[in-house]
Amino acid sequence: AVPLSVTTLAAMKTRGERIVCLTCYDASFAHLLDAAGVDVLLVGDSLGMVLQGHRTTIPVTIEHMVYHTACVNRGRSQALVIADLPFLACATPERAVDNAARLMQEGGAQVVKLEGGAALLDTVRRLTEQGVPVCAHLGLQPQSVHRLGGYRFQGRDHAAAETIRHDALAMQDAGASMLVLECVPAALATEISLTLSIPVIGIGAGAGCDGQVLVLHDLLGLNAGRPPSFSRDFLRGHDSIAAAIAAYVAAVREGSFPAANETPY
Ligand code: KIV
Ligand code: NA
């Protein structure tokens, strides 16, 4: 069968089929997730936290991202591979183009994801013009944790919601092929999903998005501290990792994940 692309994901949105995404950092999990029918493998810079043991994603370098993207790419056959541009990799449009080239040429990514709003519109245009599919990322942007003062829900007051709504449309207009919304109120995420023509993937953003993403380790109940309020331990009640992944895929497809008690705002 033909591997998935941003075009197939857009067609899924049109048909009302929910898109299943998970983070993935190595070839063994890429093989397992791909076989379980996960549509998108996101090589997230969350690897800085769940693999490297850092408290933030800030220490992650483009070298780390290229390495893990290449590992994931070797393990998949059908799934779309999205790779994160790490901290300051988009400080200028030129740097973003160079770093996207590395993720695609050395890593084998099909899409690159970048965190940020209005300031990145030129970069998104540049990448798109050069044939690089872009996934935007709004709401909670973990690379900005030191500016934000912590990992907090975003877009909870009128002005902040308005900025996210506006940036989402601007990202689509600039050429973004997808959008991740992290930790925003469900009503806002649902409204943006209905407004945009590109697929909107939520995490901590309620069940009204076009698809869902979780950090693989959260799904498997592997968190050192307490799990995020919006995640679910899918290994509970299942006797293998494969069964847990299958349960996640089914729950996203049917819209039963996230449930109301996994939707904080
Ligand atoms: O790095 C990551 O895992 C992410 C997702 C949580 C969207 O960016
Ligand atoms: Na990320």
Image (cartoon, helix red, strand yellow):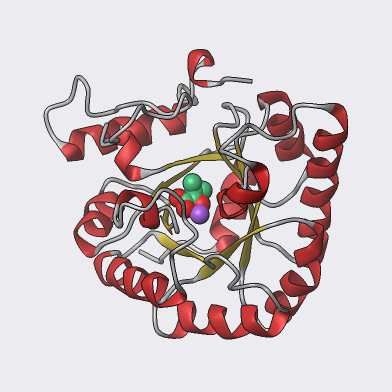
Residue sitting at x 39%, y 43%: 215
Q: Residue at x 56, y 47 (%)?
A: 12
- The quadrant where residue 93 appears: bottom right
Picture residue at 80% right of the left edge, 63% below the top: 119
Number of residue marks: 0
Q: Position of residue 131 (x, y in %)?
A: 64, 80
**Picture quarter with the C terminus:** top right
215 horizontally vs 260: left or right:
left
87 or 6: nearer the viewer: 87
163 vs 75, left or right, is right
Q: Work out which quarter of the rendered image holds the N terminus and state it.
A: bottom left
Residue 155's x, y, as percent? 74, 33
Left or right placement of residue 114 versus residue 250 in this view: right
Q: Residue at x 59, y 27 (%)?
A: 206
| Residue sitting nearer the eye, 178 or 107 | 107
Q: Which corner quadrant of the image does residue 85 belong to?
A: bottom right
Residue closest to the far left: 239
Residue 181: x and y in percent read 63, 42
Residue farthest along the top direction in this orientation: 261
Residue 150 x, y percent position in the rendering:
58, 39
Vertical placement of 206 versus 177: above or below?
A: above
Q: Nearer the viewer, residue 113 or 86?
A: 86
Q: Please say if 187 is above or below 10.
A: above
Q: In the image, is 94 to the left or to the right of 5? A: right
